[in-house]
Amino acid sequence: MRLVIFGRQGAGKGTQSKLLAEHFGVPHISTGDIFRAAISAGTEIGLAAKAIMDRGDLVPDDVLRGIVAERLAQSDAADGWLLDGFPRTPTQADDLDQIADPPLDLAINLEVPEDVVVERISSRRVCKAEGHIYTANDPSARSGICEVDGSAVVQRDDDTESAARHRLEVYAEQAAALLDRDGEANGVVTGDGV
Ligand code: ADP
């Protein structure tokens, strides 16, 4: 199974992706998680991406193309994958068409209204090791220790209100252009994410 999940920030892509990836037995590949791991590891890509991500802007398409091509070529992705956060621009969609072999089976668009997601984003907390997602009131968020892997639970640097609003604006421009262009032709299915 080769899947893509779309949806604005806070739509629940990360949470649903983990469940779906487990269900289909395929790796959950989140480009945001890849960048956050690169930042923690202090790699060159991480250093270059950090400032862009903190502003809520998009990392250039050619960087994404290289990262995704390399990740999909790994052995655990040979029989399928679930992409979360990529593609999110029309150019990235063209790149995925070239990279994905065999091609994508299904793209799911998780729809949640903007006022709902602003609330979700500001209360979102994530664990540093594996990106498990909590809300500010969950025991793991309150204790600051992830109940699954024991790592620190923090607020993402780009989950501040101003960065989050900017990310939503960028999403509205880029991902909407992508869905308008490719949505119907490529059989994107829409799910209610509320
Ligand atoms: P969000 O839901 O806010 O987009 P992600 O974890 O998916 O969160 O991504 C965090 C950041 O990583 C993005 O704001 C962007 O800077 C960068 N990023 C992740 N995926 C992509 C992508 N496909 N194209 C460009 N930048 C990306």
Image (cartoon, helix red, strand yellow):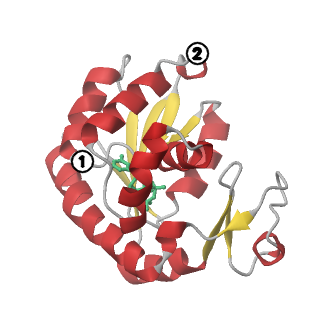
Q: Quadrant of ligand 1?
A: bottom left
Compared with residue 169, is residue 29 higher up or lower down, i.e. above or below?
A: above
Q: Position of residue 49 (x, y in %)?
A: 41, 50
The secondary element bearing badge 1 is classed as: loop
Q: Residue at x 30, y 49 (%)?
A: 88
Residue at the (84%, 74%) spot, across then down: 143
Residue type at mark 1 is Thr
Left or right: where does residue 88 sit relative to residue 74?
left
Check contact, mark 1 vs mark 2: CB within 8 A: no
User: Does residue 151 appear in this view?
Assistant: yes
Q: Earlier in the sequence, mark 1 or mark 2?
A: 2
Q: Which residue is mark 2?
A: 75
Q: Nearer the viewer, residue 173 or 47?
A: 47
* Left or right: 132 in relation to 31: right
Q: Residues within 10 Å of mark 2 (few under 14, many from 20)?
A: few
Q: Amino acid at mark 2?
A: Ser
> In the rendering, at what x and y percent does residue 103 appear?
35, 23
Residue that carries the numbered disc 1 in the rendered image: 89
User: Does the residue tagged 1 have its C-beta within 8 Å of any atom of ligand 1?
Assistant: yes
Callout 1 crowding tier (Cα within 10 Å): few <14, some 14–19, many ≥20: many
Q: Residue at x 26, y 55 (%)?
A: 175
Quarter of the image holding residue 107?
top left
- Figure check: 68 above or below 56: above
Tag shown at residue 59: none
Is residue 113 visible in the rendered image? The answer is no
Which of 100 and 19 lies nearest the eye of the viewer?
Answer: 100
